Image (spheres, grey):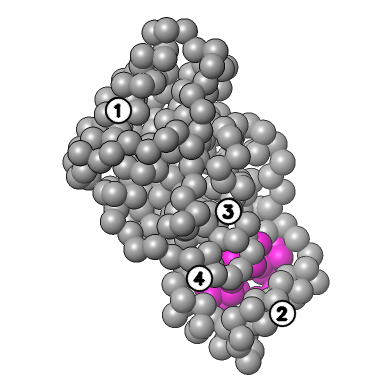
Amino acid sequence: MHSKLPFARPLPGNLTPASQKTLLEWIHSAGQIETESEFKLYLDHLQTQLPTKHMVITLGRINQHQQLQRVEKVVNVSFPPDWVEHYMSHNYISCDPVLRSVMGQGPIHWADKFARAKGMQEKQFIQELSSIGMGTGVSFSALSERQNLVCVLSVSGSEIGKDSQLTEMLNSLLLHLRQAAGRVANLAPAAPATMPLSQREFDIFHWMSHGKTNWEIATILGISERTVKFHVANIIRKLNANNRTHAIVIGLQLGLTTVAGVT
């Protein structure tokens, strides 16, 4: 049994006694998780207590700006498997406005992020997600700066976002879910310095590594070609590369990819 650390996030002060009891039960049970099967059972049980049909956990590395830059593991609780496969194969991780947010700053309401989407791929992602009835939802995140990890819990639907107590409960729970996910995944610590690119630079590097030209990248991301050229120059400089091709080779050697396992 793991000893319990002091709460890094204060427990919500406005919960009813019943809600306080539920939250403490969630936290206590999360502290007992030691295996992947226990983690999945915990998440299955958690979903039965929430007004949502779809839930997924994403575990990944953050950059120096506290943005998710590389996904290490996806635990699909109840998102449609076909959608998850489609999401991964189309690399929607790189354009998902929710996963592109600064992490550890409180609940992320999808509608707020989707309304500000500009890039072609972002808009395509949102349209496809909405077409299968998952255009609304909330995501919660917790960071471990020492391990350079973030855990993101995403749930679809509008009910949780309307319930302030439930939103605060899940936000408080995330620290403990992140600790459990870290134990189960058993990932080695990694310093933010191993993620040297900004989020925009990382997006551009992804498309560079797939052979896209500056003009094609500009079209995909909804930015000017001049902006792409500026970021490409920064990527080459930050990776201490001689040219574009050399930067791609170095970046791939550093593992600057978004490929992750899904369970």
The magenta segment: 200-220
Disc 4 from disc 3: Cα separation: 13 Å
Give the vertical position of 100 relative to 260 (above or below): above
Q: Is residue 135 magenta?
A: no
Q: Residue furthest top?
A: 17
Q: Residues within 10 Å of mark 4 (few under 14, many from 20)?
A: some
| Horizontal side of residue 119 vs 171, given as left or right | right
Residue of label 2? 233
List the residue tagged with mark 1.
Answer: 28
Q: Residue at x 54, y 13 (%)?
A: 14
What distance separates the C-alpha of mark 3 from that of mark 2? 21 Å
Query: As rendered, which of 97 and 148 lies closer to the eye?
Result: 148
Give whichever of discs 2 and 1 has the lower sequence position: 1
Q: For this rendering, which residue is in front, 83 or 137? A: 137
Residue that badge 3 annotates:
67
Secondary structure mostly taken by the magenta-highlighted segment of the chain: helix
Q: Position of residue 227 (x, y in %)?
A: 78, 68
Q: Amino acid at mark 1?
A: His
Can you identify the residue that label 4 sits on? 194
Q: Earlier in the sequence, mark 3 or mark 1?
A: 1
- Taking the spot 44% from the left edge, 72% from the top edge, the residue there is 255
Label 4 secondary element? helix
- Distance from disc 4 to disc 2, alpha carbons, whole Å, reads 19 Å
Q: At 66% across and 53% down in the image, what residue appears?
A: 120
> What SS does tag 3 mark?
loop
Q: Quadrant of residue 178?
A: top left
Element at label 1: helix
Q: Residues within 10 Å of mark 2 (few under 14, many from 20)?
A: some
